[in-house]
Image (cartoon, helix red, strand yellow):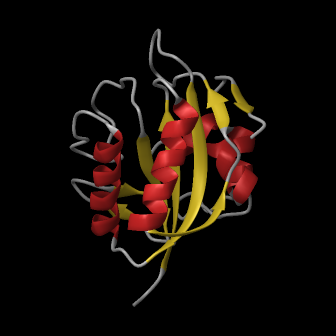
Amino acid sequence: MKEHHVFLLQGSNKKNRKEYLDQSLILISQKIGKILKKSSYFESEAWNMKNSPPFYNRALYVKTSHSPISLLENILNIEFLIGRIGIKKNHNHYTEEYEDREIDIDILFYDHIIIHSSILTVPHPLLHMRRFVLEPMCEIIPNKIHPIFNLTLLDILGVCTDKLNVKKLLN
């Protein structure tokens, strides 16, 4: 069975944010695969949302045997188990209004492949514009090459125009 290297981003801005990230981490290790590395917790202002509490985010490096679609199905199941109401119809296609959430798990990278389908886009199409994604990713793998831009994540962070406050939390 082929193993794939994926990078995920966890996010929560409801109630006990850290607890939701920790609950989803356990489920990810049970249902998706071995967690090779995880970033610190980061707190950030809600991106493109008004009057919302700040998010906790964490980046994960995971080894999985799941196909991209199976990975997506498992992520949606984990989000549902933790209490996320509403279905993301187009994972990584952001046309809906953003709303507060117990847990959000995004697929940032899947191996070095590029996927454009009606239900999944990889690499995540907005990651290069979001400091709350780039900072935790740079903590765990700053020299990862983005397969579309052919730049390291650290290079992308260096030119990111997102000015929202992102701070690393002491665990």
The quarter of the displayed image where residue 141 is located: bottom right
Q: Is residue 71 above or below residue 98?
A: below
Q: Residue 52, how many percent across, how many down?
A: 47, 15
In the image, farthest residue toward the right: 170
Q: Is residue 61 visible?
A: yes
Q: Residue 16, how many percent across, how many down?
A: 52, 28
**Quarter of the image with the C terminus in it:** top right
Relative to 105, 76 lies left or right: left
Q: Is residue 34 above or below residue 162?
A: below
In the image, farthest residue toward the top: 51
Identify the residue at image location x=58%, y=36%.
Answer: 18
Relative to 107, 118 lies left or right: left
Identify the residue at image location x=71%, y=57%.
Answer: 140
- Of 64 and 164, which appears nearest the observer? 64
- Of 161 and 60, which appears nearest the observer? 60
Relative to 71, 112 lies left or right: right
Q: Is residue 6 above or below residue 78?
A: below
Q: Residue 49, how many percent across, how many down?
A: 44, 18
Identify the residue at image location x=46%, y=49%.
Answer: 24
Identify the residue at image location x=71%, y=46%.
Answer: 40
Count of numbered circles in the view? 0
Q: Is residue 13 above or below residue 52?
A: below
Q: Is residue 123 visible?
A: no
